[in-house]
Image: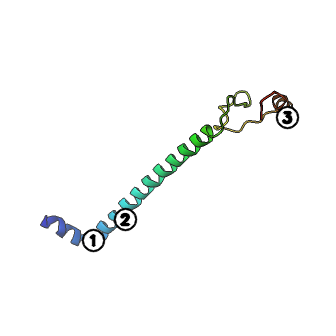
Amino acid sequence: MNLAFRDIRHNLGRFLLTCVGLGLLLGVVLAMIGIYRGLVVDALTIARAPAVDLWVVEANTRGPFAEASRVPGDVREAIARIAGVA
């Protein structure tokens, strides 16, 4: 134990720099976890909020939330004319 304290006293700057680096690393990891969990919660909230039976998206896309989908106007109007479609 004495040797550790002596080493810290001898290299105090290096010890403090290491502590700051580890603190920043921990902060970045926690921030990344928070961002990831926020994205997951947002995606689940968007998907579960409306009680829909069917999503209409452009062909050859990955779905309504993964990328933009451009449905032509005539298709949109045809879908809107179907009974029960909001």
| Residue of label 2 | 20
- Picture coordinates of residue 80, whole percent (x, y): 82, 32
Name which of mark 2 and mark 3 comes first in the sequence.
Answer: 2
Q: What kind of residue is marked 3? A: Gly
- Report the front residue among 59 and 47: 47
Question: Distance of mark 2 from mark 3, alpha carbons?
Answer: 56 Å
- Picture coordinates of residue 4, whole percent (x, y): 18, 64
Q: What kind of residue is marked 2? A: Val
Q: What kind of residue is marked 1? A: Leu
| Residue of label 3 | 73
Quarter holding residue 66: top right
- Mark 1 vs mark 2, foreground winner is 2
Identify the disc placed on residue 12: 1
Quarter holding residue 49: top right
Left or right, 2 with reference to 71: left
Name which of mark 1 and mark 2 comes first in the sequence.
Answer: 1
- Mark 2 vs mark 3, foreground winner is 3
How would you rate the neighbour count of disc 2 (Cα within 10 Å): few for under 14, some for 14-19, many for 20 or more? few
Left or right, 56 with reference to 14: right
Name which of mark 3 and mark 1 comes first in the sequence.
Answer: 1
Q: Quadrant of the N terminus?
A: bottom left
In the rendered view, tell whether residue 64 sits above or below residue 13: above
How would you rate the neighbour count of disc 3 (Cα within 10 Å): few for under 14, some for 14-19, many for 20 or more? few
- Picture coordinates of residue 11, whole percent (x, y): 25, 69
Q: Residue at x 18, y 68 (%)?
A: 5
